[in-house]
Image (cartoon, grey):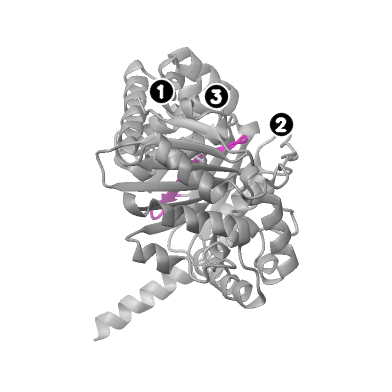
Amino acid sequence: MIHFHKFVLDNGLRVIVHEDNSSPMVAVNVLYDVGARDELEDKTGFAHLFEHLMFSGSMHIPNYDMPLQMAGGENNAYTTNDITNYYLQLPKENLETALWLESDRMLSLAFNEQGLEVQRKVVMEEFKEHYINKPYGDVWQHIREMAYTTHPYKWMTIGRKLEHIEQATLEDVKAFFKKHYNPLNAVLCVAGNVTAEEARAAVEKWFGNIPPGEKYERNLPQEPLQTEKRTKTVYAPVPVDAFYKVWHIAPRLQSGYYIADILSEVLGGGNSSRLYEILIKEQQLFSDISCYHTGSLDAGLLVIAGRLSKGVSMEAAEAAVDTIINDIIVQGITSDELEKAINKVEAMIVFEDVNLLSRANNLAFYELLGDAAMMNTEMENYDGISLEDVKVYAARTLVDTNSSVLYYYADGKTAIAEEEDDDDEDDE
């Protein structure tokens, strides 16, 4: 059981305090309720761009990292399609340094052409390195654009097009900051060796005078029900053919989300999963294969992704995957599989709770979902799942009419290059 105190400042900032005197450290987590899904379709990548801009200095603190490092702290951040999260850890006696830094950039982030240009180049290089020039880097661009026709999940967190970041103006980023980066749209968690009274006084001191801003009311276009299978074929300079099949699943707070989590464990959770046992060990059709879900707050995707063994056709690989899926639809899963999957989820939750930063992150996240107390009841959503629940959900969800399939073929260039390299080495 994770104990915590919760209060809301007059400006609307939601605050969670988790006391843990077993460590000399404190963790500070600031979660903003904004992700790639909140971007305009012709101006994507802004949520991720802001993850970088938030470290480029405020009006009063030109270098965010320097005072934090002098205080013995370390920090990081991440962006998803749903949220943007900033977190740090430092000795408890320097808590106010952390709150000073976070409150100042929430209140008065510095905007100038030079800072924007620096971070723009960083993000553009990241886009090129990981999504354009990297083998299989554009897979999720293809999958999202195929699986989603309407919902803004149809573009990646990095953005839909490189030009959107290239063309971002100072006015664009100022407007994005004003809309999303304010107390009404954030959750602050302080965790570690600090009392609730100490934390409240410090938070009031540093965040209490920040104007609340306007509450962002999310009104996203909803994805219509998919009624037919979608397919796409891509040829790229990659080492081997790869196969991807995805299905739409329930949103984060619906029961179907937790059932989909169980299905992903049964299908692809390690070397004893069905996909690994049958398609790699027995039939040797794939060199690697996995099953997971995107964890999205709105309706996400259950994903099967694998790279084919040499000489295996895409048709044979897909047929083998479909056979395993159809067996679950018709026969369901076993009681042993269900128990093992639930136990694995529970172990993962317990393991996460060991880490102070993870606790701070999770408390803020569950508060964003509706109530930080949900962190302590998450396992109840799994414990109530029955074999029949899984079978019914699989029969309704893992059907071809709800699926999108990406056939990602190696175009031969990489294989030829590798053979030439091997020949050169043999000649030496």
Q: Earlier in the sequence, mark 2 or mark 1?
A: 2
Which residue, given by chain and number where applicable, does mark 1 sit on?
Answer: 379
Which residue, given by chain and number where applicable, does mark 2 sit on?
Answer: 225
Write down the region rendered in magenta.
Answer: 297-312
> Residue 166 at what x, y percent from top left?
67, 71
Verify whether residue 309 appears in magenta.
yes
Q: Residue at x 62, y 67 (%)?
A: 110
Which residue, given by chain and number where applicable, does mark 3 sit on?
Answer: 256
* Residue 408: quarter of image: bottom right
Indicate the amino acid at tag 1: Met
Indicate the amino acid at tag 3: Gly
Above or below — where is 162 with respect to 118? above
Q: Is residue 333 left or right of residue 81?
A: left
Q: Residue at x 63, y 72 (%)?
A: 116
Foreground: 206 or 152?
Answer: 206
Q: Is residue 311 left or right of residue 329?
A: left
Verify whether residue 273 appears in magenta.
no
The crowding category of the residue bearing disc 1, from other C-alpha atoms within 10 Å (few below 14, some 14 to 19, many at least 20), is: some
Q: Are marks 2 and 3 in contact (CB under 8 Å)?
A: no
